[in-house]
Image (spheres, rainbow, N blue to C red):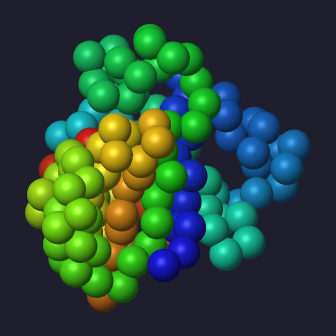
Amino acid sequence: MKIDHLGIAVESIEQALAFYRTALGLELTHTEVVAEQGVKVAMLPVGESRLELLEPTGSDTPVGKFLAKRGGGIHHICLGVDDLEAVLSRLKAQGIPLIDDKPRVGAEGCLVAFVHPKGTGGVLVELSQKQPQSLSSTEETSSAATHTV
């Protein structure tokens, strides 16, 4: 298990990139629109992990509601796992509340599932398993993949 990325809710990816790319010198490696959840994501590698900027496509989307309630900032932490099904089974057996009982396709074609903050000390935790067909280059896509945040 490793920290795959930190999800950061922002009003505008373009404005946020002025800081992350220009001021810090981070490289933008991937952008994607996850249409079903109304979010645009931008990935920026940082060492062995990444930052995922999350811009809502509307105010009634999960990230839009998060921004309205809490403002911009850290939205979730994503842990990369080798066997998502096994991790979910273990969490279920321990009575940990899950948002997703089963893996689903998320950004970059990864299998993902979210753990409810009630079971994690208040942190929204995303679990992610990379797939062979996962996207690896910078590209803009429109996806029907669910990325509940």
Q: Residue at x 24, y 73 (%)?
A: 90
128, 133: nearer the viewer? 128
The residue positioned 37% from the left and 40% from the top of the image is 117
- In the rendered image, residue 146, in percent from the top left (x then y), is placed at 20, 49
Q: Position of residue 100 (x, y in %)?
A: 17, 53
Q: Nearer the viewer, residue 72 or 126?
A: 126
In front of the other: 148 or 53: 148
Q: Seen from this angle, which residue lies furthest right? A: 23
Instruction: Say whether residue 114 is left or right of residue 40.
Output: left
Q: Residue furthest left?
A: 102
**Residue farthest along the front direction in this orientation:** 94
Q: Is residue 134 visible?
A: no
Quarter of the view holding residue 145: bottom left
Numbered-mark total: 0
Residue 88, above or below 15? below
Would you identify the image quadrant in which residue 36 lies?
Answer: top left
Q: Is residue 82 above or below residue 80?
A: below
**87 lies left or right of 122:** left
**x then y, percent, for residue 22:** 83, 45
- Quadrant (top left, top right, bottom left, bottom right) of the C terminus: top left
**149 displayed left or right of 1:** left
Q: Tell me if residue 24 can be seen.
A: yes
**Vertical placement of residue 2 versus 64, above or below:** below
**Horizontal and vertical percent for residue 77?**
50, 52
Please tell me whether residue 12 is drawn above or below residue 106 in the rendered image.
above
Q: Residue at x 76, y 57 (%)?
A: 26
Residue at x 67% of width, y 75% of height: 48
